[in-house]
Image (spheres, rainbow, N blue to C red):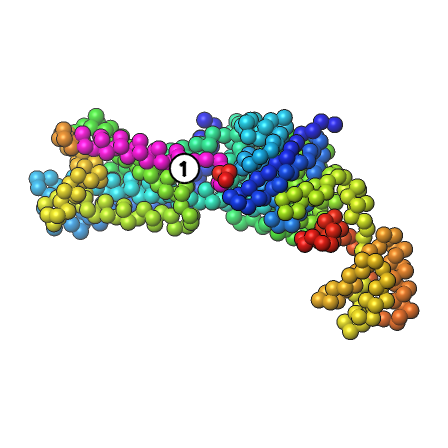
Amino acid sequence: MRIVIEVDGVSKAFGPLPALREVSFSVPTGSVCGLLGHNGAGKTTIVKILSTLLEPTTGKAVVAGFDVVADADQVRQSIGVTGQDAALDGSLTGRENLVLFGRLRGLKRKQAGVRADELIERFDLVDAADREVCTYSGGMRRRVDIAVSLIVPPKVLFLDEPTTGLDPRSRRDVWTLVASLAAQDVTVLLTTQYLEEADVLSDSIVILDAGRVIASGTAEELKRRMGHSYCQVTPLHPEDLVRVASVLGGYEGAEVDAAANTVSVPAPHGVTTLGEVFRKLEELGVELMDISLRKPSLDEVFLHLTGPTLTV
Amino acid sequence: MTALVALTERQVRASVRNLDIVFAVLVPVLTFVGFTIGLRNVIDTGGISYPQYVLPAVVVQAMLFGALNTTDLAAQEKASEFGVRLRTFPISVYSPMMARMLYCLIRGALALIAAFAVAYPFGFRMDGGPGFGAMFVVLSLTLTLALSFGAEATGTRAKRSDTSSQLLLIPQLLLVLLSTGMAPVESFPTWVQPFVEYQPISQITETLRGFASGHVEGTNLTITLVWCLGLLVGLGYLAIQGQGRQRGRRG
């Protein structure tokens, strides 16, 4: 497999503040790489560097075979970028935005029009295409925004938190879209705060914390390292929480969240662990509101990877 | 080149929707009618008729307004995600600015047409003929371009995008009020007369009057050309300096 994004020891400082520290990773052609991390972890800074909006303080980054500093013009020919907020002209219609950006990518007016119509069809925007973008819902705007990034199919597509602020349905739509892109040989680098999103969409995941890469690998590899799902119990009566906690205290890594009225225990054996927990609570005679298996939260993953001594 | 055309088209389209283009036409029409009806029997303009005297000032005012508009366009684009996206596109970093300048010229041309159209029935005549008429147009558009560069330079450096054109409102007002545009220099207090006489708006207005009547005074023409060239180069330099792909340089 050929490597299309190569980040090698990139650091970036804003004044005295280090935003990225010695970040290295690579992404093979036609795959989806998820950059996972909290706000302020440095995800957007990486996207800005790779899309030629910022220069790294030290280190080297190559996109589609071109250095992002020395060959920035060629990099811009090869990429599409969709940021956290819609980067569209609100006073133009969806179609006009698509045609405008198509022409800025070097298409003739007519070609741009044909291409815009294709994308309008594919992104399910036919009804809205001739309305001004400022009247669109958040989900529609995001779709147009991604369509703009694809007006001339890029080698690399950067999606910076593509589902932030979207309702669940629109989020699903974006997911389907991203999955279909990888099938067309577009390499996607997406950033997200949601473990689930990175898990569903990405072939490989890079986890960032405070500007450093703390783990990377395929989703499967990471999940093995992150361990396990959690079995989460919510008693019907909050006053039972203490009893539940004491019964489940025997599990290593059990956590009590009094505010949410839940107790979580690691469930390395999935449903078997859940059954075990359920039986124990039945013996105790506690009424339950909910018992379920859930994926580890990002906080739990970070704790797991960085160790409990580090605060995240 | 395609990028420049596409971006200019976008600006024109937006201005039709947000009615900026209507203001471009209305400002010279309303100021001309207002001044002519209100002041034609009040101010002594020497030998020439008031419409003939005031039209160049109305044009200069319209050119100033048009240029001022660039401040907001530049500031908004600088602050918007749209502007950020443009910087990731394979186009010249100067294309968006050049599109704003072109739009300003188009706006200026429309304002000129409107000004002539309204002034003609009131008795304004281009007595100098088509040659001087052409020079009148070129000088007006040069003025709006030069000031638009200044507005661009201000807009791209403004901290807030919503109020940036206000920054230039005071210098603009001062230049217009303290000029020979609306009233002759003798009607000002003695102590401001030197400023009133030699500042660019007065000199350029005077030259435009000369072009309209068909005879321009040499000293005045020289001062006007120096002002125009100076403003064009100086403000153009500042505008170009403000263009860059990166919001924060490495530091």
Which stretch appears magenta?
B222-248
Give the image location of residue A227, x and y in percent. Answer: 81, 49
Whether residue A74 is visible here, answered yes or no, is yes
Work out whether B177 lies above or below A75.
Answer: below
Residue beneath the point at 70% across and 38% down: A33
Residue B123 in the figure: left or right of residue A212 = left
Check disc 1 and report the residue beneath it. B242
Marked residue chain, label 1? B
Q: Give whichever of B245, A290 is nearer the camera.
A: B245
Q: Is residue B83 visible?
A: no
Question: Which residue type carries mark 1?
Answer: Gly
Callout 1 crowding tier (Cα within 10 Å): few <14, some 14–19, many ≥20 = some
Question: In the rendered image, which quarter is residue A4 located in?
Answer: top right
Q: Describe residue A306's horizontal placement relative to residue B111 as left or right.
A: right
User: Can you say which quadrant of the picture contains the N terminus of chain A?
Assistant: top right
Per the image, is A257 magenta? no
Where residue B54 appears, as percent x and y from the top left, is 18, 42
**What residue is rendered at 47% in x and 45% in y?**
B79
Residue extending farthest to the bottom is A239
Relative horizontal placement of residue B44, taking residue A188 as reference (left or right): left
